[in-house]
Image: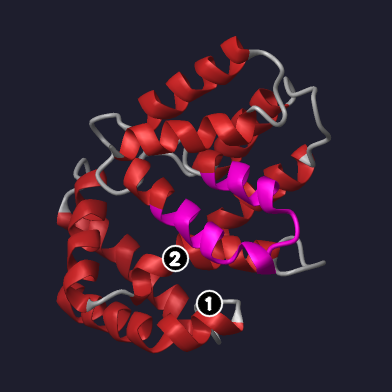
Amino acid sequence: MVIDNLQSDWTALSEKYFDNDAIIGSLWKSIQKKYTSKSRYYHNLIHISTMLNLAKENKSQIINFDEILFSIWFHDIVYKSTSKKNEEKSADFAKLALEKSSKKKLHINKIHQLIVSTKSHEIILGENQDNAFLLDFDLSILGQSWEVYQNYIKKIRKEYQIYPDFLYNPGRIKVLRHFLDRKTLFFTEKYQQLLEVQARENLTKELRLLN
């Protein structure tokens, strides 16, 4: 059901920009294949669906809505736990794919930058709150209940199962401390109010588990 709904969403979005059904179908097959690979425990189509739903909830606040949607679709399309260039490669994948669009103007370079911004989770494009919303959608899992968050960290650990604890734990601790040292985890006022406190509690609890 989730996949069927997502395919409908993808088709509705891409038909605005591509006049070739074969390209739309081919890109969907790539998206489905990438996000359903066996190594995807968290960064999968459920994650994409969650972010798309959050985008829809905030549509009235987003200036370049379709660019945000495409950024969500492609932001984790390349994901290998052994790579430090997933975001750049995902951004390049998106750029190459979207350059085939011809029906309507699309800000492809903006999409590229939005995807790259998910690497450090810092705003690159500051002319409006689109980049802020994208990053907040991506990190919204951090502010869920402790039970949901525990399930999330188990899935992340599985994605990095190639690494033993003595290698994984220090890296994860570094990530958690980086987020906790930030003035705010979330960039929009809405998600600061909704998720900030719970997110900091969750990160702190996980940090204790790892130490």
What range is drawn magenta here? 50-72
Q: Which mark is residue 186?
A: 1
Tell me, yes or no, whether the highlighted magenta stretch contains residue 173: no
In the depicted view, which residue is nearer to us: 43 or 14?
A: 14
Quarter of the image for the N terminus: give it. Answer: top left
Q: Does 69 appear in magenta? A: yes
Amino acid type indicated by mark 1? Phe
Question: Taken as a whole, is the magenta stretch helix, strand or loop?
Answer: helix
Q: Give the vertical position of 121 relative to 115 (above or below).
A: below
Residue positioned 58% across, 60% down in the render: 134
The residue at 54%/29% (across/down) is 11
Residue pictured at 28% horizontal, 79% vertical: 202
Q: The disc labelled 2 sits on which kind of residue?
A: Leu
Q: Which residue is mark 2?
A: 139
**Percent x, y for residue 70?**
61, 41
Residue 193 x/y as whole percent:
49, 88
Image quarter (top left, top right, bottom left or bottom right) of the C terminus: bottom left
Side of 29 where 113 appears, left or right: right
Q: Position of residue 17 (x, y in %)?
A: 72, 29
Residue neighbourhood size for the residue with mark 1, other residues' Cα within 10 Å, grouped as few (<14), some (14–19), many (≥20): many
Mark 2 vs 1: CB contact within 8 A: yes
Q: Which mark is residue 82?
A: none
Does residue 79 show up?
A: no
Toward the top, the furthest residue is 22
Nearest the camera: 23 or 34? 23
The image position of residue 85, as x and y in percent, is 53, 41
Residue 17 visible in rendering: yes
